[in-house]
Image: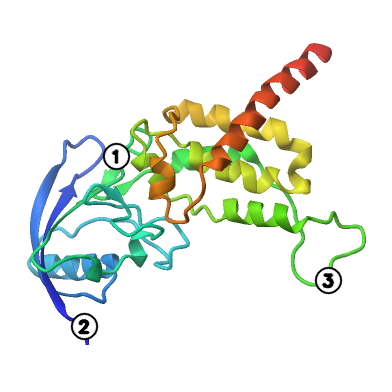
């Protein structure tokens, strides 16, 4: 049987991008410890509406740790105190009765606040758009003319593709860098043989767009610690290696084809 918690929330409230914003203290008694963090916010919002107050705006969708929209900073940690967990998978049993919980939106220049806890993360979409796409057949028995993918390569690409584009790496980084996100998106395309043809143009395009919106990586490692999918910063090293090669190869190509 679930026990109940009496909590106090310090929630960031901001009417829009141009508003200064402030913390609002909200009492949350009788919260069941088997609720997810988002379910707790649902209960709080129902009570606020019943009291004639403005509900808390926050982003959410699948609530299964897949979509990446549940982007909250909880007590100064992206997605809360549990490693490898999105906010929607964080349960209230991780908190103590009587605890005060501070809830904020992602804090990054590239993520302007829309309202309260919801931010605009479309800068990440610009990076994805710069990378294009590949076609890799999946499913049943492969056709004889398909490009075979070695299992170690497929596993590495799959690990990178686990990125859910939540932006926790950016929010956790002291520099507001998106290198882990970009490296994961680069790797899951470039590691596969189907992505080899555009490997160097892809990494150059994606990194250049990233640098237009985000800060620079200085290897703090906070991104890997905050990532709900535990994506390794080794992918950043692979991206940097390919980016340097891309600058050399593409410069040489342009010098031969002015």
In the picture as drawn, the residue positioned furthest to the right comes out as 144
Is residue 80 placed above or below 182 in the rendered structure? below
Is disc 2 surrounded by few (<14), some (14 to 19) or many (20+) residues within 10 Å?
Answer: few
Between label 1 and label 2, give the one nearer the viewer: 2
Image location of residue 186, percent across then percent down: 62, 41
Gap between marks 1 and 3 measured at Cα:
47 Å
Whether pointer 1 and pointer 2 mark residues with C-beta atoms closer than 8 Å, the reply is no
Quadrant where the C terminus sits is top right
Which residue corresponds to the image point at 16% horizontal and 40% vertical from the top-left? 21
Q: Which residue is mark 3?
A: 141
Q: Earlier in the sequence, mark 2 or mark 3?
A: 2
Q: Earlier in the sequence, mark 1 or mark 2?
A: 2
**Dividing the picture into quarters, in which one does residue 150 lie?**
bottom right
Image location of residue 190, percent across then percent down: 69, 43
Q: Nearer the viewer, residue 201 or 153?
A: 153
Whether pointer 1 and pointer 3 mark residues with C-beta atoms closer than 8 Å, the reply is no
Circle 2: element type: loop
Indicate left or right for 51 with 44 as reference. left
Q: Which residue is mark 2?
A: 2
**Dividing the picture into quarters, in which one does residue 27 lie?**
bottom left
Which residue corresponds to the image point at 70% horizontal and 46% vertical from the top-left? 191
Circle 3: element type: loop
């Amino acid at each position: 049987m679930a026990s109940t918690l009496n909590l106090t929330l310090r929630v960031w409230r901001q009417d829009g991008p141009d508003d200064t914003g402030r913390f609002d203290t909200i009492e949350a008694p009788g919260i069941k410890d088997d609720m997810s963090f988002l379910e707790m916010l649902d209960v709080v919002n129902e009570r606020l509406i019943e009291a004639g107050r403005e509900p808390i705006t926050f982003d959410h969708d699948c609530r299964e740790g897949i979509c990446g929209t549940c982007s909250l900073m909880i007590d100064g940690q992206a997605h809360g105190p549990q490693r490898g967990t999105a906010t929607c998978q964080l349960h209230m049993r991780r908190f103590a009765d009587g605890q005060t919980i501070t809830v904020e939106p992602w804090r990054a220049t590239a993520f302007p606040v829309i309202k309260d806890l919801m931010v605009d993360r479309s800068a990440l979409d610009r990076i994805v758009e710069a990378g294009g796409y590949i076609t890799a057949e999946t499913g049943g028995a492969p056709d004889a003319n398909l490009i075979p993918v070695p299992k170690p390569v497929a596993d590495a690409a799959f690990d990178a593709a686990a990125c859910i584009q939540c932006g926790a790496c950016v929010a956790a980084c002291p520099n507001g860098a998106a290198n882990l996100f970009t490296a994961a998106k680069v790797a899951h395309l470039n590691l596969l043989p189907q992505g080899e043809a555009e490997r160097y143009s892809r990494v150059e395009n994606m990194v250049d767009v990233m640098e237009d919106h985000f800060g620079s990586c200085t290897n703090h490692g906070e991104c890997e610690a905050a990532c709900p999918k535990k994506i390794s910063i080794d992918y950043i090293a692979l991206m940097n290696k390919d980016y340097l090669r891309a600058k050399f190869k593409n410069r040489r190509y342009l010098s031969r084809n002015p």
